[in-house]
Image: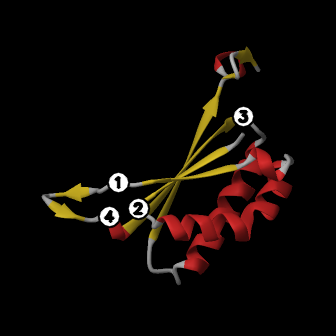
Amino acid sequence: MPRLVFKNIEKEDVKRFSLETVEELSRIIGCPQDWITFEHMENTVFSGGSDITKQSLYVEISWFKREQEIQDRLAAEIHSALDKQFGGAREITIIFYELAKENYYENGEHY
């Protein structure tokens, strides 16, 4: 944990992002690299009947609460890496979802 879910981005772009950033993200978060997962989610976004999927990119991060400074550094690193990957051509939205440890189970066991 954490789990990064990417929307409005191609699968190969998520794969490349994961390879290029996992080391730095792990350092910022303070966890082993294999705890971080990158998920590609296919979706289509409409506004006023028009497909606007390629206009913006979303990253949703589910994790256990950390200090605001760590969250800010992680968001900045993700934004910077994606902005570089796409040449500043996409709006990037990053959303954090905090998981309560008492609600998280792994292999049937409470965390």
Q: Sequence order check: which comes first, mark 2 or mark 1?
A: 2
Measure the C-alpha gap from mark 4 to mark 3. Answer: 30 Å
Q: Sequence order check: which comes first, mark 4 or mark 3?
A: 4
Disc 2, disc 1: CB below 8 Å? yes
Query: For the point 35% across and 70% down, which residue is it?
Result: 55
Q: Looking at the picture, how far across and down is residue 3, in whole percent?
A: 64, 44
Disc 1, disc 4: CB below 8 Å? yes
Query: For the point 67% across and 38% down, which residue is it?
Result: 63
Measure the C-alpha gap from mark 3 to mark 2. Answer: 26 Å
Of marks 3 and 2, the one in the foreground: 2
Of marks 4 and 3, the one in the foreground: 4
Q: Circle 1 is placed at which residue position?
A: 43
Along the line of sight, which residue is nearer the eye, 92 or 107? 107
Q: Circle 2 is placed at which residue position?
A: 8
Amino acid type, residue under disc 1 in the picture: Asn
Along the line of sight, which residue is nearer the eye, 107 or 92? 107
Q: Looking at the picture, how far across and down is residue 96, in whole percent?
A: 59, 43
Q: Sequence order check: which comes first, mark 3 or mark 1?
A: 1
User: In this image, 79 relative to 31: left or right?
Assistant: left
Measure the C-alpha gap from mark 1 to mark 4. Answer: 8 Å
How many other residues sit within 10 Å of disc 1, few (<14), some (14-19) or many (≥20)? few
Vertical side of 85 occupied by 67: above or below: above
Q: Sequence order check: which comes first, mark 3 or mark 2?
A: 2
Q: What is the number of the mark on residue 55?
A: none
Q: Circle 3 is placed at which residue position?
A: 65
Q: Circle 4 is placed at which residue position?
A: 53
Measure the C-alpha gap from mark 2 to mark 1. Answer: 7 Å
